[in-house]
Image (spheres, rainbow, N blue to C red):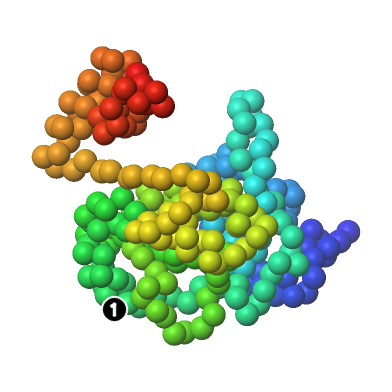
Amino acid sequence: MDSPQSEYSEEFLELVKSIKNKRAQVVINYIFENGFITTEDLENAGYSHAPRAARDVREAGIPLTTFTVKSTSGKSIAAYKFGDLSQIQANRNAGRILFTKDFKSRLYLLCNGKCSICNTAYEERYLQVDHRVPYQIGGDLGLKRVYSDFMLICASCNRAKSWTCEHCENWLKIKNSELCMSCYWGSPEHYNHIALQEMRRIDITWKGNEVKYYDEIRKLATENNIALPEFIKNLIIPPTNPEHSV
């Protein structure tokens, strides 16, 4: 009987052999055996953050398609299978080049020790180097790095960016780097869309002594039976505006 890998090209199998990331290997091998892998399967394998495991595979150069299936309890959950393998581009998606400590430290100084998305201050070890243009679209084209092509973001914002990008039409079909750079997730300092939608966004983190103010605002929002984001909007935009009336 043929092995599950026999239907794939030698080029693809060679790329798979070159991948050393353990999470990526778990995803790939499971798809080889079963056709797809679910978030439930990943949790059973010990990986609570399934999108991160899927991203490891994509960053190694293998396209994945996300779809929905039912879990063993009947709940709708995400699943992943190989996408269009003709999209594999050896010169762009042969795996990331690691960032040096000096490179990250320089970015840390440039961003004043804060996440570039939510503007929250973190120790350097808690921030992650992020391609402004997602790796899946821009790739790594060489050893030379330009600081302006990267930013540091916290784990929470990294997850939010990953989810949004992976469901964006530009990620799925268009693959235009310029569109990424005019998006909130690529250039939070100056942008004109969020995943091709005409939207604006503010990420605010309340930290330390500021938490008491957050609690007070949340309490007022609850008392007025208004969702917290809408309540904060009404503090800025007078409720006499029909579009933002309570």
Residue at the far right: name it. 1
Q: What residue is at 78 percent from the left and 74 percent from the top?
A: 10
Disc 1 is placed on an element classified as helix
Asked whether 214 or 38 is in front, the reply is: 214
- Amino acid bearing label 1: Asp
Asked whether 70 or 153 is in front, the reply is: 153
Q: What residue is at 29 percent from the left and 78 percent from the top?
A: 102
Q: Can residue 145 be seen in this view?
A: yes
Give x and y (percent) for residue 22. 53, 62
Give x and y (percent) for residue 92. 60, 76
Asked whether 141 or 126 is in front, the reply is: 141
Give x and y (percent) for residue 161. 46, 52
| Side of 246 where 169 appears, left or right | right
Does 151 sit above or below residue 166? below
| Side of 241 where 205 appears, left or right | left
Q: What residue is at 39 percent from the left and 23 percent from the top?
A: 242
Please give the count of numbered marks on the rendered protein: 1
Hey, which quadrant is residue 85 in on the image?
bottom right
| Residue linked to disc 1 | 102
Asked whether 119 or 58 is in front, the reply is: 119
Q: How crowded is mark 1: few (under 14 residues within 10 Å), some or many (20 or more)?
A: few
Hey, which quadrant is residue 70 in on the image?
top right
Q: What residue is at 26 percent from the left and 34 percent from the top?
A: 236
In the picture, the quarter occupied by the N terminus is: bottom right
Does 225 sit above or below residue 137? above
Q: Is residue 227 visible?
A: no
In the picture, the quarter occupied by the C terminus is: top left
Give x and y (percent) for residue 25. 59, 61
